Each structure stands twice: as structure tokens, then as C-alpha cells.
Amino acid sequence: DVDASGFIFLSALSDTSMGLGGKVLLFPTKSNTSYVKLTPEKPLRLSAFTLCMRVATELRGEREIILFAYRTPQVDELNMWR
């Protein structure tokens, strides 16, 4: 059994006044398949971005987990591992 419980605090994901600021995503049960997918309402043409993230987890040990992933339909662009 893998304990993947934890939460993600979304401080600012949008430059609009109606973003996800202050929201929390909670994963209360054990799972090795839990994830969140955020899809923009408008197409993005990013040349750069800044990621500021606070993560809390109850996972112990050396198990590798992806904390953040940025992907396009064609390419797995960026993974941030713990």
C-alpha cells in the first residue's frame, strides 16, 4: 500500500482576478494514481513561466514522486521530482 495522501496549495495559477489563488487540493486516501489536471480555458503560448509551490505530504522514505509536470500533447516537457 502506498500512502499518497497530502495536499497541494494553489497560491496563484492565473494572472486574472478569478484564479485559483488560496485554493487547496486534498488527497485524503492512499493511492498511487491520484493526480490533478489543470487545463487552461484559452490556448497558451508560453516561452517561460515561474513555478512557486508549497507541498505537504505524509509520504515517508525515498519513494520518488512527481510534484509538478508540464506537458504538451506532443512532448513531456518538465517534471519536478521529490
Image (cartoon, rainbow, N blue to C red):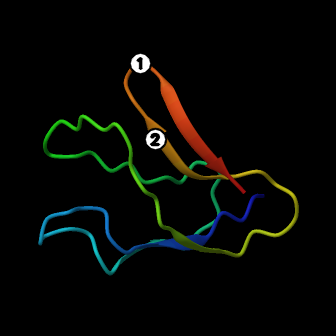
As drawn, 80 above or below 46? below
Is residue 27 visible from the viewing direction of this image? no
Residue underneath mark 2: 70
Residue underneath mark 1: 74
Of 34 and 17, the residue lying toward us: 17
Residue 7, numbered label:
none
Image quarter hosting the C terminus = bottom right
Residue at the farthest front position: 47
Of 64 and 70, the residue lying toward us: 70
> In percent of the image, x 69 and y 52: which residue is there?
65
Measure how far apart labels 2 and 1 are at the Cα level: 12 Å
Residue at the farthest bottom position: 22
> In percent of the image, x 50 and y 32: which residue is there?
77
- In this picture, residue 22 sits left or right of residue 58: left
- In this picture, residue 34 sits left or right of residue 36: right
> In percent of the image, x 82 and y 69: which residue is there?
60
Q: x%, y% of residue 32?
A: 65, 51
SS assignment at label 1? loop
As drawn, 65 above or below 23? above
Q: x%, y% of residue 8?
A: 49, 70
Of 2 and 37, the residue lying toward us: 37
> In percent of the image, x 32 and y 70: which residue is there?
12
- In this picture, residue 62 sits left or right of residue 72: right
Disc 2 residue type?
A: Tyr
SS assignment at label 2? strand
Disc 1 residue type?
A: Gln
Q: x%, y% of residue 45?
A: 24, 34
Task: Count residues near mark 2 (Cα–Cα under 10 Å), then give few for <14, some for 14-19, many for 20+.
Answer: few
